[in-house]
Amino acid sequence: MNAAVQFVHEQLTGKKEFPKFKAGDNITVNYKIIEGGKERIQSFRGDVIKRQGQGHTATFTVRKISDGVGVERTFPIYSPNIESIELNKTGLVRRAKLYFLRERSGKSARIKEKRVNTAATAVAQ
Amino acid sequence: MTSIFSQDGKQTACTIIEAGPCIVTQVKTTETDGYNAIQLAYGDKNEKHTIAAEKNHFAKANTAAKKFVKEFRNYFTEKNLGDAITVDIFAEGEKVDVVGTTKGKGFQGVVKRHGFSGVGEQSHGQHDRQRAPGSIGNSSDASRVFKGMRMAGRMGNDRVKVKSLKILKVFPDKNYILVNGSVPGHNGAIVYIQK
């Protein structure tokens, strides 16, 4: 990336500590909302269908089914309004952009969970 | 171009401009030249590619050879030969005009170049002229095409001034300024900033 762009963002954009996530993962985004001068936190839980962009302007899109209607929401990763991100499930998918989920519903729209053998990794460490 | 977030989470598109240091290489006054101006130079140039005349001109200002030289008329701040002008002259929240050369688009048709709407439908005899300009004038009365008729041709690569861009931030260490919105030209293009 351009050195000037990197320098400016190092100065202006705050650092964020989030769990690593990618397309296919199920996450909860806790997002700050200002309503009539009052601030509250709204959580949005769903599957990540894409991560887009690079550096400090990158975004990710979360898709969920709300009352039978698909809802997608795109968040800028470095937005100061993102309070926190929780990783609920790691998905087992073969591609980076899961647009095919839009045409699917019900059982076929589910993402298989990637099971990590925590005991084995603990021993390895 | 990039974008930054404000404290309340609003994202603003902005451009980083490296503004200086510009060296004063010539001072013109009403007595000597008939008008007031200063000449600024920016960007180092390879010594090998510098002709002797240029070398001596820059030597007068006691500086290395520079790539870009531009005269600014009616510059009323007192400056001497060899002075460096940096981003210190800009302040946050100030409005500036930016002049630059837009990206060249090559030979373009009327739809892209002048915003014509094209034919609008694919059927009713429009076999292969969806983006054609249509009629360019009358028949016997006039019997000619008027001057200035908008047609296809070279697009872009024009000198353009973008007015009243707000300075969001000044970085004195690196000589960067951050202006709101976009400026003409490709990445790394040279632009002139007017206050």
Image (cartoon, coloured by chain):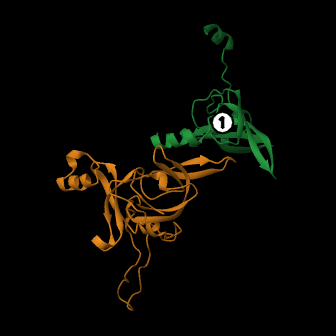
In percent of width and height, residue A8 lies at: 52, 43
Q: Tell me which corner region of the image, top left, top right, bottom left or bottom right, holds residue A114.
A: top right
In percent of width and height, residue B92 lies at: 56, 54
| Above or below for A21 versus B152 | above
Q: Nearer the viewer, residue A47 or B164?
A: B164
For residue B183, say whether it is visible: yes
Q: Nearer the viewer, residue B136 or B82?
A: B82
Say whether residue A94 is left or right of residue B160. right
| Above or below for B13 versus B100 | above
Say whether residue A62 is left or right of residue B15. right
Q: Nearer the viewer, residue A65 or B193?
A: B193
- The C terminus of chain A sits in image quarter: top right
| Above or below for A75 versus A21 | below
Label 1, secondary structure: give it: strand
In percent of width and height, residue A48 lies at: 66, 36
Q: Residue at x 30, y 73 (%)?
A: B31
In percent of width and height, residue B108 lies at: 39, 64
For residue A2, say whether it is visible: no
Label 1: how many Cα within 10 Å (few below 14, some 14–19, many 20+): many
Say whether residue B14 is left or right of residue A64. left
Say whether residue B160 is left or right of residue B8. left
Q: Chain A appears in which tint? A: green
Count up the numbered dots: 1
Amino acid carrying label 1: it is Val
Most extreme residue toward the top is A123
Q: Tell me which corner region of the image, top left, top right, bottom left or bottom right, holds residue A67.
A: top right
Q: Which residue is mark 1?
A: A48
Q: Chain B appears in which tint? A: orange
Q: Nearer the viewer, residue B121 or B5?
A: B5
Mark 1 — on which chain does it sit?
A
